[in-house]
Image: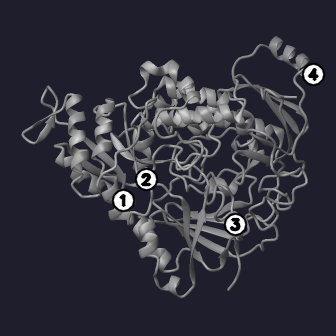
């Protein structure tokens, strides 16, 4: 039996814990686990509800990405990786159903056990589980994976590692993980960590491995060919160990998936029109209506499919870096929001058909309600009242313009806020008391033509305010590097959130993440109220308490004025060749990285 400790624990305490083990809270092995309540599917389920269980296998498709890549290791911070890779090649102990808010079912593990307080979790591996080279997945591989990801992996894995007290092998195919934090979600997160091969990485530099060192996984696909920055070829393993698992039935049906890389989104769209790629997600409603009428669509060779969903809006927009002036002042941030003429920009670029994001969890029951906070939310936020920004408790709403290009009311409000913050117009230039101009740069990835168009329209309003602002473009590799180092003043931003937000919220906007390079807390949120609401959310024992905490978090973030919100996407829009098919039953999460192409199949014309 091997034991790995994430923080020093004496031999005596470890032995004492083992003695107490037998008296711990009752737990029984289960086929799945849900954040609240019981899993929707029974132990003998045949397949996930939103797949076609008898979907045919076969066919080849080509997907397209803009930008490039210089790494094929999606589990470390270094390098730019094809974003789809980790969804195809690697697996975790449990797999997530996208038709439930947060429920997992056995994948590499045949069962999971947790006590009532979820202070620990135990897994039993499937005997047949194996890596793509035919070697078995062992408890030793699982323990190694938690160690290496927790110490050398991407920052998104570090939060869980710090909350693990110990990992203990309890049998030939079983292990137990003990936590040091009261956090009901940890048992589920532990089940979602990718499992790597110890044999591949023993004695090698995992964090700085070269492009040729492709991590070995147990997933349905393996990387069989690539050319740096040009393409990646994925081939389905005909001897994939999990092909007959109920959780996998009807999924990963294509024999080959190739990912080609293009200079920017415009070139990518032209590749779709020319038939060089098989499917493309479109995020602009106006473009979807007006530019997806090319010959292949008119001839029926290309299909336009819309996939509705029930998930929160998340946040998309221009994020302001509060670590740097002038955005360390909330009044300046509010001025930037007032100056952003959403109605005009939305009408110009999308035809006005896409609704605006109004908060981080808008479009869901988790969203903050308009107006003053209700009693439950107020009770949670009151201890932090002195540190809350105006509007948090009283109610905060984004400005609405008259839709004209001038946006006079927004500009007047912005001017007043800037003057309150110590900036005054001097010879047409907004300056502070020392005479320094108010200036900053909007960093945009050069291959994102939509974000460039938004920035160009926004720049006109900012210049009317007397601000010295310029747009800086950079390639995808440099953009990722600067984003990771928080080397920007304002830049583009996208955070998707789920119907069951959890520990990732700390990585998105927790105070510790604000100073952690590579974290997703781009705005630099360091708010006791935000941290407190995340803590309450993670320790909640009921859905009511959980919902109140998320709504309070939503208020603190939205009233923090960290992001200038764009429009939301209430449905997925995918153009695809007619040979690509998908099930009629849709998951509540709609389209996403684990929907297309995972549950789609190829049907020859």
Upstream in the sequence, badge 2 or badge 1? 1
Label 2, label 4: how many angstroms apart (C-alpha)?
Answer: 54 Å
According to the picture, the residue beneath numbered tag 2 turns out to be 356
CA gap between label 3 and label 4 equals 46 Å
Residue 196 visible in the snapshot = no
In the picture of the structure, the residue carrying the numbered disc 3 is 235
- What residue is shown with label 1? 346
Disc nearer the start of the sequence (3/2): 3
Residue at horizontal 15 percent and vertical 32 percent from the top? 436
Q: CA distance from mark 2 to mark 1?
A: 9 Å
Q: Is residue 15 left or right of residue 579?
A: right
Quarter of the view holding residue 595: bottom right
Give the alpha-carbon distance from disc 3 to disc 2, as whole Å: 40 Å
The residue identified by callout 4 is 22
The structure residue drawn at horizontal position 69% and vertical position 36%, both measured from the top left corner, is: 543
Point out the image quarter for the N terminus: top right
- Badge 2 density bin: few <14, some 14–19, many ≥20, Cα 10 Å: some
Whether pointer 2 and pointer 4 mark residues with C-beta atoms closer than 8 Å, the reply is no
Give the x, y percent position of residue 29: 90, 38
Residue toward you, 347 or 229: 347
Assess whether mark 1 and mark 2 are in contact (beta carbons under 8 angstroms).
yes
């Amino acid at each position: 039996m091997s034991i790995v400790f994430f923080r020093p624990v004496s031999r005596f305490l470890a032995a004492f814990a083992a003695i107490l083990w037998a008296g711990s809270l009752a737990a029984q092995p289960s086929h799945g686990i849900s954040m609240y309540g019981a899993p929707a599917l029974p132990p003998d389920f045949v397949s996930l509800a939103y797949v076609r269980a008898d979907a045919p296998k076969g066919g080849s498709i080509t997907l397209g990405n803009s930008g490039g890549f210089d790494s094929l290791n999606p589990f470390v911070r270094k390098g730019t990786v094809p974003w789809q890779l980790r969804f195809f090649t690697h697996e975790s102990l449990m797999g997530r159903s996208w038709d439930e808010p947060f429920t997992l079912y056995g994948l590499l593990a045949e069962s999971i056990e947790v006590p009532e307080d979820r202070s620990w979790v135990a897994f039993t591996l499937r005997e047949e589980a194996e890596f793509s080279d035919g070697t078995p997945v062992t408890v030793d591989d699982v323990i190694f994976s938690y160690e290496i990801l927790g110490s050398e992996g991407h920052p998104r894995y570090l939060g869980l590692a710090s909350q693990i007290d110990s990992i203990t092998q309890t049998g030939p195919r079983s292990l137990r993980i003990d936590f040091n934090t009261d956090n009901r979600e940890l048992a589920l997160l532990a089940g979602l960590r990718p499992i790597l091969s110890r044999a591949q990485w023993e004695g090698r530099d995992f964090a700085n491995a070269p492009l040729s060192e492709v991590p070995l996984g147990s997933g349905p696909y393996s990387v069989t060919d690539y050319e740096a920055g040009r393409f990646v070829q994925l081939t389905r393993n005909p001897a994939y160990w999990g092909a007959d698992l109920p959780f996998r039935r009807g999924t990963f049906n294509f024999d080959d998936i190739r990912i080609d890389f293009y200079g920017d989104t415009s070139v990518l769209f032209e590749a779709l029109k020319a038939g060089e790629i098989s499917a493309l997600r479109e995020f602009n409603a106006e473009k979807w209506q007006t530019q997806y009428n090319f010959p292949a669509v008119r001839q029926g060779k290309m299909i336009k499919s819309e996939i509705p969903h029930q998930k929160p809006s998340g946040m998309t927009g221009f994020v302001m870096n509060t670590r740097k002036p002038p955005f360390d002042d909330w009044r300046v941030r509010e001025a930037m929001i007032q100056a952003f003429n959403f109605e005009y920009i939305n009408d110009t670029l999308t035809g006005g058909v896409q609704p605006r994001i109004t908060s981080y969890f808008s479009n869901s029951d988790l969203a903050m309600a308009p107006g003053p906070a209700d009693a439950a939310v107020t009770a949670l936020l009151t201890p932090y009242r002195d540190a809350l920004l105006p509007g948090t408790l009283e109610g905060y709403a984004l400005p609405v313009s008259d839709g004209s290009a001038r946006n006079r009311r927004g500009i007047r409000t912005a001017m007043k806020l800037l003057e309150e913050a110590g900036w005054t117009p001097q010879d047409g230039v907004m300056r502070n008391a020392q005479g320094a101009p108010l200036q900053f740069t909007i960093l945009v990835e050069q291959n994102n033509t939509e974000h460039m168009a938004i920035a160009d329209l926004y720049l006109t309003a900012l210049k009317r305010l007397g601000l010295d602002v310029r747009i800086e473009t950079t390639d995808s590799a440099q953009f990722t590097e600067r984003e990771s180092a928080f080397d920007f003043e304002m830049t583009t931003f996208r955070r998707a959130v789920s119907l069951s937000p959890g520990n990732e919220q700390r990585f998105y906007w927790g105070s510790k993440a604000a100073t952690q390079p590579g974290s997703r807390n781009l705005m630099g949120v360091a708010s006791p109220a935000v941290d407190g609401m995340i803590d309450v959310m993670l320790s909640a024992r009921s859905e009511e308490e959980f919902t109140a905490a998320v709504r309070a978090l939503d208020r603190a973030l939205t009233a923090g004025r960290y992001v200038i919100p764009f429009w939301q996407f209430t449905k997925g829009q995918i153009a695809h060749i007619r040979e690509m098919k998908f099930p009629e039953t849709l998951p509540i999460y709609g389209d996403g990285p684990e929907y297309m192409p995972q549950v789609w199949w190829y049907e020859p014309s």
